[in-house]
Amino acid sequence: MISINNLVKHFGKVAAVDGVSFVARDGAITGLLGHNGAGKSTTLRVLYGLLKADSGSVDVDGIDVLQTPLQAQERIGVMTDAHGLYPRLTAREHIEYFARLRGLPAQVINDRTQVLLARLGMEDIAERRAAGYSQGEKMKVCLARSLIHNPQNIIMDEPTNGLDVMTTRSVRNILQTLKAENKCILLSSHIMQEVSALCDEVIVIAGGKVLFQGTLDLLIKQTGQNTLEDAFVSVTGTGA
Amino acid sequence: MKSFVVVLLKELSDASRDRRAVLSLFLFPVLAPLLIYFMFNKIIDLGEDALDIELPVAGAEFAPDLIDFMQQNGISIKPLDLDVSNNGFSAATSVQLKTAIENRDYDFALLIPADFARQVAASVTVNVELHHDSSRTGGGIKVARVQNLIEAWGKETSVLRLMLRGVDPAVARPVNVGRIDVASDQARAQALLNMIPMFVIMAAFMSGVGIAVDATAGERERKSLEPLLVNPVQRSQLIIGKWLAAALFSIMGLITVMALNVLALSQLPLEMLGISFYIGANEVAGILLVTIPLALFATSLQIFIGIFARSFKDAQVYIGLMSLLPMLPFLYNTLNNNGRELWMSLVPMLGQNMLLADVVSGRTPAMPDFVLAGICLLAWSAGFIALASRLLKRESIIFS
């Protein structure tokens, strides 16, 4: 479970995140919804320990991220906005590198890698070097290496951005499986379709502030709109 | 397994597949000893050539004394069939000579007039002509040697003439310059030997640079830094792993440079230059003791710059400038005549340069100098690594 309380983060004088609070539950997929520059990535980066907060608190399964970022990172799997791979390493080597950095035993690494390769349908690229991977193949490697330690909490920054239909589908399937395993999944997106297809709950964020948190039905009901997109525009108030 | 070992192994296997990194590892260490080898060969050739002069002479039969003197001094005479009957030498002879020299039939030639012996006997000044092409490099030494010998014969003759007339030869020679040439082949060769420490230091800088930049600025440029940092690993562990990987490459480079240099020098007849060059187990151990801290230092600086730089290109520019650093201690040592002082051991690379120069020229440096210079470099390295680890915590460095 992830809970953020009154988080504030400035870059210079600009408040990128300005008092954000929300909770992402276990066994649910929570969507962080907002325009580009709304503060989604900044919030997530504080959450996975790469940015320091100016004030507020962030905790993961009761561990304070701001005080003990390394302990918190052990409980999180992150797929960052950046999907950089090492062009001379194979998919398997990418996954093993992160697994070893996390100190997993060799047997566990082997077994988990096999499972993930199968689940993501990437056996064919397991021994191939990353130079020349398609966007989808890159994304699968990123996903696999972020899940190798079987984390309780999964954070994804725009996970299906730029993916084709088939890859998007397999990512969705994985997320549903993880949800069924009672994991806590938090993803950011600016694509309505994706959020409506996946998320149990959404947090609408704009200008660094949370404008809405609740189920999709509630969002539509509250705004009196017919579609999620209209509801989103009506909440953020910048639909002109 | 400690995290830094994981990073080290990954970076090593990654870099060993990188043609650029492998090339930068071997290019310099292979080229530098070749350069040394060819330069030495050149010096030895020049030395051999200067001793071995074949002098084409027209009219040799007219000056047997002079020719004897030349031959005694190691010049072999090759008679030329040219018209020297005219004492002013004919224009046709000059043209003939000019063409022959232009055609490289020979590089120079001596003309002796037909009445040489008569004029010498009459105690007047005889004109001989030494034709050569001063624009041609290489022949200068030989021409000067021939000229010196002719003048030496002239001096001897003048001494005899004065003594015949009862005059002390010293009267006609108010001053005698004794010239001692220190810029001998030996000195030149010694200067070359002194370049070896510079090459070794440069190898330390150039062999690890590919991996050092790729693992830092490259990591950021290909956007793999952020995913790496979400793993619960201390930043210092990441930096140390990357550093040691680069340092291992650097050490491999300088071992290659040393091995090939020793090989190149052992193939050369250095005794011809009067140089005693010997590298045994002790010397190799000494050089390694000096250079391994050097590799650690060079790569720590490169890792720091790689983290600090805004981009791969940025890093390459900084590091390119930094590659000039190893020249500085070499230049300083070349210009410095005051010998070793304590502070020099503390300046990174200067101390190493002096130690290496000592080892290469067969002197054994004092143990405290080794230890001091080594510890000093390791302290600098630790500083750069600590700085790089701190930089890697900065938000502006991670997300730039």
Image (tube, rainbow, N blue to C red):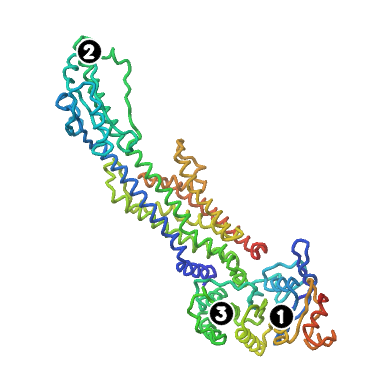
Q: Nearer the viewer, residue A129 or A228?
A: A228
Which residue position is annotated with label 1? Answer: A191
Which residue position is annotated with label 3? Answer: A137
Q: Do the residues at discs 3 and 2 belong to one chain? A: no
Quadrant containing the C terminus of chain B is bottom right
Question: Between tags 1 and 2, which lies in front?
Answer: 1
Question: In the rendered view, would you say A125 is above or below B74?
Answer: below
Q: Residues within 10 Å of mark 3 (few under 14, many from 20)?
A: some
Question: In the rendered view, would you say A37 is above or below B365?
Answer: below
Q: Nearer the viewer, residue B83 or B359?
A: B83
Q: Splitting the image into 4 quarters, where does residue B43 fall?
A: top left
Name the chain under label 1.
A
Alpha-carbon distance for marks 1 and 2? Answer: 113 Å
User: At label 3, which amino acid type do we have?
Assistant: Glu
User: At label 2, which amino acid type do we have?
Assistant: Leu
**Lateral position of residue B147 relative to residue B398, left or right:** left
Question: Which mark, residue B162?
Answer: 2
